[in-house]
Image: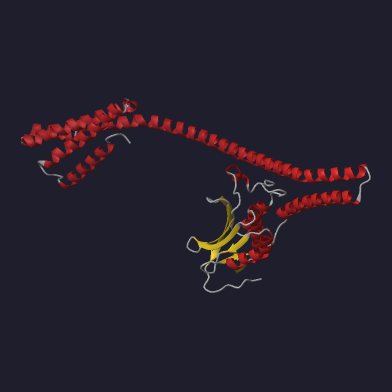
């Protein structure tokens, strides 16, 4: 917007209203008409000064036309207010200025200026249309290239993920197979006593089992699962997982404790799959906790009862900051003999159940696994649904 145009529009509006109110008034009407055209002349003259790029023959003609009208109505107002309008000559001069030759001259100049702008406006419109069409074409090309780059990036990411998966599988299978091969070759090189044969066979058996665990975990990640969703009390589901793991905790001399929830928390879930994920997390916590340590399980509602939370806390060595981003990567593990697929399997299960899982370091040492599921309000005790 041209600077000052708002004030000009307001002034013209006020003058138009006042002209309607005082039309025909012998003293006020001539002054208002004069001011009306003076304001218009001043506005266009100011535009020429402030915006040199707009200064053209057309704008100069429009400005000159409003100047002629302003001068004409000024002369007419002077005649009327001086009292000379009663003389025929002066009356004819005032009429000429208001509605005669002077008035027509001003209107004609304004009309010429407007007509001169038409070809320029038409050319500007054509240029804008061409530029708009060209810009549309460029945008379409940019969008096409963007989609192409996105598909290429996704393809590269897929190949990268496939490469990481293949490298992890090769690493996790090559090591036990290499040990098996070495043990078998050792047995075949020379006769061995029964004790040595038993030791070598035990090594072979352990490493075959390790390879089988890796293959089973991979198959578990890839196979489709059908969900059996029912309403369960989250505390009971967690309690059953704790009960199954408690013998292992006693064997490791670790205290496993489930803290009571203030009230029942209902979740729509598959009890078997959720229990499987919780058992996996509990085993991780036990394996990270030294003998004499403590593992705690807590359940609570969050977000005004809309979410159900399970927190499993251990007092182990915690996690290195650089390892946090890799915890759910295939085959990444900090455990001796681990496959690096357990946490990935837990995340997949919870994704299928509409929940999520995150791991955090504890300030006093150890780690906290936090499982979040959508909750339902519970009015009374909810059956286990076993």
**Which of the image's four quarters has the N terminus?**
top left
Tell me if I can see residue 227 in this picture.
no
Q: Is residue 35 visible?
A: yes
Q: Position of residue 265 (x, y in %)?
A: 55, 67
Where's residue 270, x and y in %?
A: 64, 64
In the displayed image of the protein, which residue is found farthest to the right?
A: 191
Query: Is residue 242 placed above or below 119 in the rendered structure?
Result: below
296 to 331, vertically: above or below: below
Q: Give the quarter of the image for residue 69.
A: top left
What residue do we see at 70% from left, 48% from top? 336
Observer-nearest of 195 and 60: 195
The vertical placement of 120 against 237, above or below, is: above
Q: Of 73 and 275, which appears nearest the observer?
A: 275
| Camera-nearest residue between 148 and 157 | 157
Coloring applied to the structure: secondary structure
Where residue 242 sits, quadrant-wise, is bottom right
Task: Name the spot of residue 49 as percent of width and height, x first.
Answer: 27, 26
Q: What is the number of callouts on the image? A: 0
Left or right of residue 167: residue 141: left
Taking the spot 27% from the left edge, 39% from the top edge, the residue there is 6
Front-most of residues 80 and 234: 234
- Screen quadrant of the C terminus: bottom right
């Amino acid at each position: 917007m041209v600077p000052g145009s708002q004030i000009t529009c307001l002034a013209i509006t006020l003058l138009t209203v006042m002209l309607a109110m005082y039309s025909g008034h012998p003293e006020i009407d001539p002054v208002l008409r004069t001011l009306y055209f003076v304001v218009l002349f001043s506005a266009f003259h100011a535009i020429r000064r402030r915006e040199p790029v707009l200064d053209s023959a057309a704008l100069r003609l429009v400005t000159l036309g409003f100047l002629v009208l302003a001068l004409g109505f000024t002369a007419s107002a002077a005649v009327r207010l001086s009292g000379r309008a009663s003389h025929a000559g002066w009356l004819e001069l005032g009429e000429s200025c208001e509605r005669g030759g002077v008035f027509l001259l001003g209107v004609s100049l304004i009309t010429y200026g407007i007509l001169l702008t038409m070809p320029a406006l038409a050319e500007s419109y054509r240029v804008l249309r061409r530029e708009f069409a060209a810009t549309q074409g460029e945008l379409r090309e940019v969008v096409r290239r963007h989609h192409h780059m996105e598909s290429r990036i996704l393809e590269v990411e897929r190949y990268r993920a496939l490469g990481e998966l293949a490298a992890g599988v090769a690493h996790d299978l090559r090591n036990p197979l290499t040990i098996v091969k070495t043990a078998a070759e050792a047995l075949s090189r020379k006769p061995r006593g029964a004790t040595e044969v038993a030791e070598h066979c035990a090594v072979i058996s352990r490493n075959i089992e390790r390879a089988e665990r890796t293959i089973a975990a991979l198959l578990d990640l890839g196979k489709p699962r059908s969900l059996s969703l029912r309403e369960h009390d989250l505390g009971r589901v967690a309690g059953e997982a704790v009960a199954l793991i408690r013998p292992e905790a006693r064997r490791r001399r670790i205290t496993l404790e489930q803290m009571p929830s203030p009230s029942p928390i209902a979740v729509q879930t598959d009890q078997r799959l959720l229990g499987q994920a919780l058992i996996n997390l509990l085993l991780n916590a036990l394996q990270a906790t030294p003998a004499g340590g403590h593992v705690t399980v807590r359940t609570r509602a969050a977000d005004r009862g809309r979410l159900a939370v399970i927190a499993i806390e251990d007092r182990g060595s915690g996690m290195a900051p650089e390892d946090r981003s890799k915890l759910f990567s295939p085959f990444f593990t900090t455990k001796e003999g681990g496959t690096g697929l357990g946490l990935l399997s837990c995340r997949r299960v919870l994704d299928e159940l509409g929940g999520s899982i995150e791991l955090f370091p504890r300030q006093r040492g150890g780690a906290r696994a936090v499982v979040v599921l959508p909750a339902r309000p519970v009015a009374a005790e909810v059956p286990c649904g076993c």
